[in-house]
Amino acid sequence: MRFKQDFFEQLDSFYTQVYPQGISNPHWLGWSDDAAKLIGLEKPNDALLMQLSANAAAPGASYYAQVYSGHQFGGYTPRLGDGRSIILGEAIGPNGAWDVALKGGGPTPYSRHGDGRAVMRSAVREFLVSEALAALSVPTSRALAVIGSDLPVWRESQETAAITVRLAKSHIRFGHFEYFCYSEKGAPDKLIQLLNFTLAQHFPHLTADAAGYKQWFVEVVQSTAKMIAHWQAVGFAHGVMNTDNMSILGDTFDFGPFAFLDTFKEDFICNHSDHDGRYAFGQQPGIGLWNLKRLAQALTPIIPSDDLIAALNTYQPSLVSHYVSLMRAKLGLSTDSCLDSAEQEKQDLALISQFTVMLDNNQLDYSNSLRKMGQVDISSQYSPLRDDMLNVSEFDRWYQAYQARVGDVADVAAWQQQRNLHNPKYILRNYLAQEAIIDIEEKADNSKLLQLQQLLTRPYDEQPDMDHYAKRPPDWGQGLVMSCSS
């Protein structure tokens, strides 16, 4: 790896330098060739294993933990920071630089009396979901590798430590701006310093002045809206949308109790600590806006309130537009119409919402139901989805409206093939990740993990030998909820 150290060298009061602590008996559990290419690496080797397990220094690395704050479940915590993640620097890749972080590298000044470790199950889940989201074209951080060990750590019981090697285009969060607004260190100077750095590194097309700041916040609002539109379209629940877990670039990161929907439920909660359903699947669009408002409040010392409000007002139309576009591709709704585009979007959103309500009412599997679109002969009065419905007359009314909206299809086979390019057959179901984790825990066998990783990197392809991975979960695996440590 070749590093540059822009954050470390230019923002010296925004972090604490801290060195990771190695894990014993390190071994590769998983490795992503696709993520490795992002930073110019090829295959894993022993020297790299020792560096990324913190048992040897990585040449050119600086090692630091960032400080930030955030709103957690609606309440403000004035000082958080990287409690179990240590950043090495920005690795230079063929198309840009990526932060490299060791998640689970040991305690930092921000660990809040924790051990700074990640348990194997959480490290494996982050590795898998990073691969899965990337293959689904959802904006996300990446995981280069997951490294196992025999180091014991305690949660509810004794487990073993592991390290996820995370790549992110940036680790700057909403919470960074909150911290330097509300801390006693002099908000405007620090905010301007952080914002100018953010623009130079990640928004080089914008100027470091009032006009650039205004446009920057518009882009943050819209990239966040786009990310959450992707979540809703693929059926992904993040589970802990605190402002310190919100990327300034609109990338999904800080994975904890996430889940992909099995049975479609608007009120699905994947985090067992979320007793009130604040971060339920259907609440995510609203929470995205709530979080952006907290960021806007932190920016009031340097950006006029009118500009912030104007940017926030673009959130809902941007989210709806992106969501409808993604769902049109899934359902095969072309945009050629004599209707005004806004009116067409409104009507399509209503049609899409009727479909998801039927899934909810009939307790149907989200991904499998959409995948069946690849079996629909749109010219026929029969749909394979009809057999899954309890209220057949309700479905028939929807299907007639749907057929009318799709219109004539000259080549049904090509239309079906297009649906299969937008509706994955395989998703990261929580029970599949759990089965891979159990094999590692009980048998020291990572073969199921590697098989699942390869499956998830080709989610749209027919893989007949893997059809059992596409089935609805067994009873024990339905609606699994997780803790923040996964």
Image (cartoon, rainbow, N blue to C red):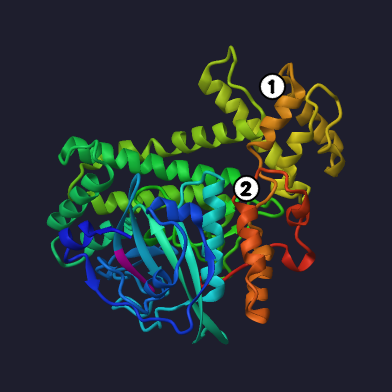
Above or below, comparing residue 458 to residue 340 in the picture: below
Q: Is residue 86 magenta?
A: yes
Give the quarter of the figure containing the N terminus.
Answer: bottom left
Above or below — where is 97 with respect to 258?
A: above
Looking at the image, can residue 379 be seen? yes
Q: From the viewer's perspective, is 110 left or right of 192?
A: right
Residues at marks 2 and 1, CA–CA distance in whole angstroms: 30 Å
- Secondary element at tag 2: loop
Which quadrant of the rendered structure holds the C terminus?
bottom right
- Residue 458: which numbered mark, if any? 2
Q: Which mark is residue 133?
A: none
Please report the residue visible at 65 percent of the width from the left and 74 percent of the height from the top: 445
**Residue 243 image position (x, y, % from top left):** 38, 58
Give the residue type at disc 1: Arg
Give the crowd class for mark 2: few <14, some 14-19, many >=20 residues within 10 Å.
some
Secondary structure under the numbered disc 1 in the rendered image:
helix
Q: Position of residue 451 (x, y in %)?
A: 66, 60
> What kind of residue is marked 2?
Arg
* Mark 2 and mark 1 residues within 8 Å of each other at the beta carbon: no
Disc number for residue 405: 1
Quadrant of the rendered image containing residue 217: top left
Judge depth for marks 2 and 1 and give the one in front.
2
Residue 274 rendering spot, x and y as whole percentages? 54, 66
What range is drawn magenta here?
84-88
Magenta stretch mostly in which secondary structure? strand
Nearest to N terminus: mark 2 or mark 1: 1
The residue located at (70%, 31%) in the rendering is 417
Camera-side residue of 383 and 274: 383
Q: Nearer the viewer, residue 486 or 77?
A: 486
